Amino acid sequence: MTATPFFELLHTDPVGARRGRFHTPHGTVETPIFMPVGTAGTVKTLSSADLHTVGAQIILGNTYHLFLRPGHTLIAQLGGLHRFMNWSGPILTDSGGYQVFSLGAAQPGAVRIREEGVVFRSHLDGSTHFLSPETAIQIQEALGADILMQLDECPPHPASRSYLAQSLHLSLRWAGRCLAARHPERGQALFGIVQGGMEADLRRESAEGLVAMGFDGYALGGLSVGEPKEQMWEVLSYAPALLPTQQPRYLMGVGKPEDLVQGVACGIDMFDCVLPTRNARNGQLLTRHGPMNIKQARFRSDAGPVDEACGCETCRHYSRAYLHHLFRSKEISGLRLMTLHNVHYYLQLMAQMRLAIQQGEFAAFRRHFFQQRSSEPV
Amino acid sequence: MTATPFFELLHTDPVGARRGRFHTPHGTVETPIFMPVGTAGTVKTLSSADLHTVGAQIILGNTYHLFLRPGHTLIAQLGGLHRFMNWSGPILTDSGGYQVFSLGAAQPGAVRIREEGVVFRSHLDGSTHFLSPETAIQIQEALGADILMQLDECPPHPASRSYLAQSLHLSLRWAGRCLAARHPERGQALFGIVQGGMEADLRRESAEGLVAMGFDGYALGGLSVGEPKEQMWEVLSYAPALLPTQQPRYLMGVGKPEDLVQGVACGIDMFDCVLPTRNARNGQLLTRHGPMNIKQARFRSDAGPVDEACGCETCRHYSRAYLHHLFRSKEISGLRLMTLHNVHYYLQLMAQMRLAIQQGEFAAFRRHFFQQRSSEPV
């Protein structure tokens, strides 16, 4: 357990949305916040200067990818992940577990889970590696992350109740080992991850076990893994309340813009997702009125910006017709301009929600958000 | 013939290097200058803001590519190429001829040259198109270029003397038709292109024919097309002197950094080449000491910048090790960072040459340039 006051809860809206501040060695993050995903030491297509331009406060790094290439030892030698990628703001790293399990699921036999940890094969070259709670912490500390995540097992969906129970017990034991392995004097926060699938009592058991150990924050894992969306919202209707009010809550791997709005309403403080970056590279752009696909022929001669209410570099300077042309011509510059827009959209959405919560108007904001999306086709 | 004073020759160094100024509807270009190539409405991987950041004064657009996709009519509807790609500085467009001939050479029978113009097949979809001197001008005027190029035939290398002679006569007739077709009141400059292969008397005949018609500037075409480099330098030893002193001279499609330095020494004012952008995407970076390939294993843990004397964003903020990692991980952001460096290197090299000419020290600059390259391995 750490005594460092990482998180300040500033205000809670009547709906339950929370406005807070998370203090890290690399600066303060205003919550609720979305963290762009920087898989392999870069948020795909963007530079660190771009991240500042679009208003990123904190980014996520993938331990699995960085461990395999270029390796955490090399990154540590070069001064840590912040210096390596020239990002001076906070970084959260995952434990590597999610990629081990999700990439492993694609190749049968590639992942073996034991009490000690997990043996897996690299998706790059098939080489065998071992990830334990202790090595997961060691790697993340070497990377120099501001927020570390415990190693947990991400059970597949669907999974039997007995599998889920067994899995969450393993994850709880791993959580304890992560806490024991980390070096609190370094000032890096460590989050526990609540598992338990869609079973309310298992979620409770997981949350209570973690809270008893005392983490700096708590994540909800095992959601948005292929289950019907109603099931995720069901879990979100009770799971945040199982967690301490005074600590941050992170909903892992979520989601679409509407999920962020609903997630904030459920009292979530932190989100991450590859959706804004990945969709940009597929030509899907986000607007107030919903997503649009720039590939469509109707945008060929459209002189307007992606979203006329958007203030990003892409919307200020380039037309839909230009982006359509760049995408069709497979121009890399187009992928970056579209990523800039989508990430800016996500971060602006979070900024608007923070303001609405502060002003006690989150319910009105949410109503307006959903009205806009249904009011007008893109 | 136009009376607009596009070009001012400010100073000629004893070596023969020239310092000038070219005035266009979108601003003034300090010469000698290198023009980054924006093939399809974008300098590959870069945005227009990036071009400003690296100090681009003028860029080149490819008529062939823009004609086929998205089409000059659409670009004109959208306000012209400047607005389409959000580039407020000058643009030079080629005539489309070079791509017609070079891409056509790859597919036998795809190009038929006639007195009226050239029939060719699109490399995108095989559709048949016709490009004449008149349509080449019409397209470039519609794009809104500041400098238009005449349509010429680019003969293959090697070509017989009789072919070269016949070809240059055709190009001269096309030059006259381009002059007749353009609208001088629009303030767009038009350049003629000297052909004649490696034959001194044919180069002279071509230059004299063009000068008699009176263009706003003159290009040397048909060089750097696969001939031994000595042959290009032989042509450059006499061809610039065939052209009017008071008008700009453009060496098309050239070249490596050392070619720019030698070209300036020969009295060339303008250059373009895909080399800095294309090589960046292949991991080849330019430094004071020569090119380096970032893929090499020795850069894996190299904490230094690409070139410690370079002030570009990439060199100020990122290590060779990081660029090596991004390249090996196929990260798009790495291609952009490396392109930023290479284009910055080219434009800085030109800026240094302009200063050296102004100070009457071009010979010393050139000596130093070649000493640096041989002094130390990269």
Image (cartoon, coloured by chain):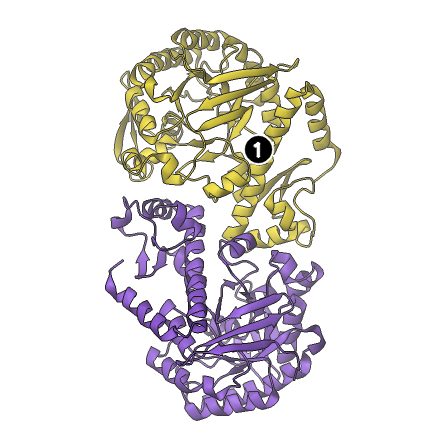
Chain colours: A yellow, B purple
* Residue position marked by numbered label 1 in the rendering: A347
Q: Position of residue B40 (x, y in %)?
A: 55, 61
A319 up-or-down from A289: above or below: below
Which residue is at a point 34% across and 17% down the rendered structure image?
A184
Q: Is residue B164 left or right of residue A183?
A: right
Quadrant in the rendering for residue B124? bottom right
Q: Position of residue A209 (x, y in %)?
A: 41, 7
Crowd around label 1: few <14 · some 14–19 · many ≥20 (10 Å)? many
Which of the two residues, A26 or B251, is positioned nearer the viewer here? Answer: A26
A209 up-or-down from B4: above or below: above
B184 up-or-down from A243: above or below: below
A298 up-or-down from B214: above or below: above
Q: Is residue B290 left or right of residue B136?
A: left
Q: Position of residue B200 (x, y in %)?
A: 42, 90
Task: Identify the secondary structure beneath mark 1.
Answer: helix
Type of residue at label 1? Leu
Judging from the image, mark 1 belongs to the subunit labelled A
The residue most toward the front is B359
Q: Is residue A155 left or right of residue B301?
A: right
Q: Position of residue A29 (x, y in %)?
A: 51, 26
